[in-house]
Image: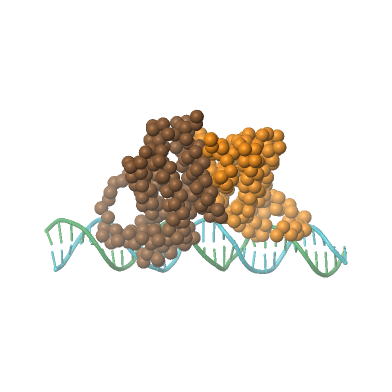
Chain colours: A orange, B brown, C green, D cyan
Amino acid sequence: MTADKPLRADAQRKREALLATAREVFDTGGFFDLRFDDFARLAGVGTGTLYRHFPTREALAEAVYHGEVATLCDRARRLQATLPAAEALATFLRGMVDHIAAHEGLARTLATLWADRSSALAEGSRALEQAVTDLVAAAVQAGAVRDDVDAGAVMMALHGIGAAHDRPGWRAEADDVITLVLDGLRRPL
Amino acid sequence: MTADKPLRADAQRKREALLATAREVFDTGGFFDLRFDDFARLAGVGTGTLYRHFPTREALAEAVYHGEVATLCDRARRLQATLPAAEALATFLRGMVDHIAAHEGLARTLATLWADRSSALAEGSRALEQAVTDLVAAAVQAGAVRDDVDAGAVMMALHGIGAAHDRPGWRAEADDVITLVLDGLRRPL
DNA sequence: CAAAATATGGAGATCATCTCCATTTGTCAA
DNA sequence: TTGACAAATGGAGATGATCTCCATATTTTG
């Protein structure tokens, strides 16, 4: 699948230009409101070129999203290496809320892409999911967290948080969701 | 806003035909994959008529959604009247998962509409949110549930469940989310 | 440096959405 | 009942976004 084909020099350049532009728009949250052809114009590229590099809007979103996910996964790994398992998990989840709060675009895009069952996104999210799964597994191992609920449930909760990003009291509610999840995860008895 | 305007007989009929067709498609989950104009053809109605009755796809979705929400709210009220507060809340939430599992279309539509921040949907969801808020408030009143988290957090979790409806292990994970929320809600100490 | 391979851009085809209005259908007063 | 007025209809075509195609330009290779 990842059969890296040698990319011509100009192609590389255009691709990067496209990505740079997309990243900008992505972060403002206007990603899905912008005519797709305009990405091309904005990036100083022809429409044909845009479509060759990214056949669909989702493909482009996915590419941008990848970077975001990488950042988050790094964070997860770093926390897992430096903190006790339970604390790492808690810190990571709290940090996710901060991150989403700071990146409107990420939240919106996540919500939209998930809603459309974009398989590309599902693919891109796998890394993030793995990171969460690892954090939870470590906490279970450490005996700090119950072992009878799937890490997928935590992902679902995170989705809920991302998907509801435009609710009036979002921040407080998001924090509350994390609180519920963390308290719910604590080994009962 | 609800200035009931007397609707002509044929208008009434067409509107009902449109709604019936939409309801059908809605429940199959194909609501957003179908050309909007085709609702008209399917319902035996001209495009113009469709657009006069429901100016946008979302307006139509909202109308169908209304019925779904009403059902759920009824359930909530009935439970609240017959069970202890904590049990009513738990039963309702568990039931939501059943309901979503049984109505693929509802889940998909919900997710899509929320992702698009459809204000119409936000409006339609208010009733559901009120029902959840009431259930939580009653449980708090009864001392069975902590009072430092907003009912909105529960809504968020429900969204997460609905939005992730196509995950492979959906059912189990959804149940786990509810478990986490319920355990998390239990008054600590 | 010439030929082959690769990539470009943007004009226009395609397709879903939505508008407009000449015609039909229903309502109501006489 | 009927005539006249209002309300509603349907579908042809305007609109506007998405995507394809290919003649031209750029890069790489021998």
Percent x, y for residue A145?
A: 59, 39
Residue at 49% x, 40% y: name it: B181
Q: Image quarter for residue A24?
A: top right
On screen, A187 above or below B47? above
Residue at 50% x, 43% y: name it: B179
Please say whether residue A70 is visible from this viewpoint.
Answer: yes
Q: Is A106 left, or right, of B44 in this rendering?
A: right
Please say whether residue A62 is visible from this viewpoint.
Answer: no
Q: Is B58 left, or right, of B180 in this rendering?
A: left
Q: Image quarter for residue D29?
A: bottom right
Residue at 43% x, 42% y: name it: B90
Percent x, y for residue A13?
A: 73, 52
Q: Is B105 left, or right, of C10 in this rendering?
A: left
Q: Residue furthest top?
A: B189
Residue at 36% x, 58% y: name it: B19
Percent x, y for residue A96?
A: 60, 39
- Judge by depth and name the residue closer to the eye, B125 or A25: B125
- Judge by depth and name the residue closer to the eye, B53 or A67: A67
On screen, A133 above or below C23? above
Percent x, y for residue A74?
A: 69, 41
Q: Residue furthest front?
A: A189
- Judge by depth and name the residue closer to the eye, A185 or A128: A185
- Which quarter of the image is occupied by the N terminus of chain B? top left
Q: Image quarter for residue D13?
A: bottom left
Labels in figure, total: 0
On screen, A79 above or below B69? above
